Image: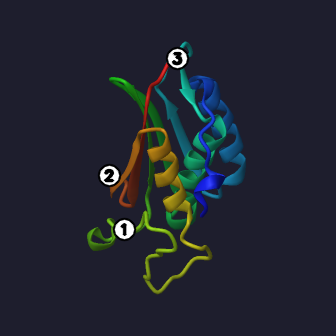
Amino acid sequence: MERAELNLQLEEVNVADLSQYLQEKLLIECKASLQWNNQICNEISVLLDKSLTERAITNLVKNADKYGESEVYVCMVKIVDSIVVSVEDNGKGIPPQQQANIFEPFYQINDGNQKAGFGLGLAIVKEIAQLHGGSVVVSDSKYGGAKFDLTLPIKH
């Protein structure tokens, strides 16, 4: 992953339109049942790198689709001065002792059931979040798998 590849190019983005576009795109691409809940009103436009934000959310949803059992849950909300995108699945989750490492390039969980990949998706999500001045964290999902919260500060 080369940093030059991820140059931030901010533009005014309507968050509801972005959510709708990603929902339609990912409903087609995911094997799992995708439950999408956008709680952001139509009027909210923020400065984001649209392409990189799409990439980060897509990476999170596709990981949930890949490692979850059969369901992926996405929720987009505005909390204070940030947009938070939560992506959860009903898979086995991520062992607590490995949660700190999953955002490192090329790191993959070795659970004996190796899925194809290079271990770059979450590292790229972290890089995109940081470029925006935000963050990504992992925790346990109420559905049994992993929950990722991508937080992007609202800039006007």
Helix, strand or loop at label 3? It is loop
Q: Which mark is residue 56?
A: none
* Earlier residue among tags 1 and 2: 1
Task: Find disc 2 in the rendering and name its residue.
Answer: 142
Residue 82 image offset from top left, x and y in percent: 39, 29
How packed mark 2 is, by other alpha carbons closer than 10 Å (few <14, some 14-19, many 20 or more), is few
Can residue 70 be spotted in the picture?
Answer: no
Task: Find disc 3 in the rendering and name its residue.
Answer: 44
Which residue lies at the image location 37% right of the left edge and 69% below the top edge? 101
Distance Cα–Cα, label 1 vs label 2: 13 Å
Residue 68, above or below 57: below
Can residue 94 be spotted in the picture?
Answer: yes
Three-letter code for the amino acid on which mark 3 is drawn:
Ile
Viewer-proximal residue among 91 and 11: 11
Helix, strand or loop at label 1? It is loop
Distance Cα–Cα, label 3 vs label 2: 28 Å
Residue 116, above or below 94: below
* Earlier residue among tags 3 and 1: 3
Residue 79 lies in what quarter of the image?
A: top left
Furthest toward the left, the residue is 97
Residue 105 image offset from top left, x and y in percent: 50, 69
Q: Which mark is residue 94?
A: 1
Disc number lying in front (3 or 2):
3
Residue 6 image offset from top left, x and y in percent: 61, 50
How packed mark 1 is, by other alpha carbons closer than 10 Å (few <14, some 14-19, many 20 or more), is many
Residue 109 left/right relative to 6: left
Disc number lying in front (3 or 1):
3
* Earlier residue among tags 3 and 2: 3
Furthest toward the front, the residue is 4
Three-letter code for the amino acid on which mark 2 is drawn:
Lys
Viewer-proximal residue among 72 and 25: 25
Three-letter code for the amino acid on which mark 1 is drawn:
Ile
